[in-house]
Amino acid sequence: MFGFRKPNINDGLEIYKNTPGAVLVDVRTKDEFNMGRIPGSVNVPLNKLSQLEQYASKDTPVFVYCLNGARAGRALKRLQRKGYSRVVSLGGVKGYSGSVENGRG
């Protein structure tokens, strides 16, 4: 029997770190982002994805994450429809085992 395997954010972050020019995007709300984010990530909430153009062109490798993975999945689909060709959903930060940064950034 085949099952659905959620993305492993820790494995995905290793790929992100080894992808030249990649951008790490947290699609949670500003308040969620400020409470704790993965170092190096930028905040572009799901409802403001049009602002991604400040950080990435449509051919830039973009890695998105959220809290549980649902918003990251929606962001992936929306960005693909907007013409972003190199988007990866990392899933949710709840599965992240590294350090987080707090506060604005």
Image: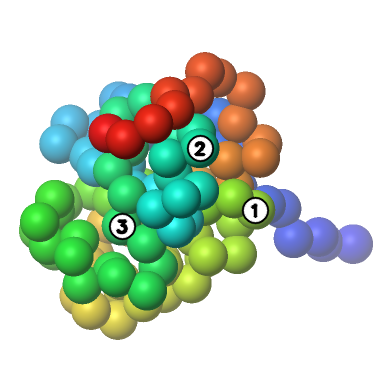
Alpha carbon of mark 1 to alpha carbon of mark 3: how far? 16 Å
> Which residue has dot 2 on it?
35
Residue at the image position 50 percent from the left and 48 percent from the top:
32
Q: Nearer the viewer, residue 96 or 100?
A: 100
* CA neighbours of label 1 inside 10 A, class few (<14), some (14 to 19), many (20+): some
Which is nearer the N-term, disc 2 or disc 1?
A: 2
Q: Nearer the viewer, residue 2 or 66?
A: 66
- Helix, strand or loop at label 3? It is loop
Residue 28 lies, with reference to residue 36, above or below; the image says below
Which is nearer the N-term, disc 1 or disc 3?
A: 3
Q: Residue furthest bottom?
A: 81
User: What's the residue type where badge 2 is placed?
Assistant: Met
Q: Which mark is residue 68?
A: 1
Q: Which mark is residue 44?
A: 3
User: What's the residue type where badge 3 is placed?
Assistant: Val
Alpha carbon of mark 2 to alpha carbon of mark 1: how far? 15 Å
Residue 99 lies, with reference to residue 38, above or below; the image says above
Residue at the image position 65 percent from the left and 53 percent from the top:
68
Residue at the image position 13 percent from the left and 50 percent from the top:
55
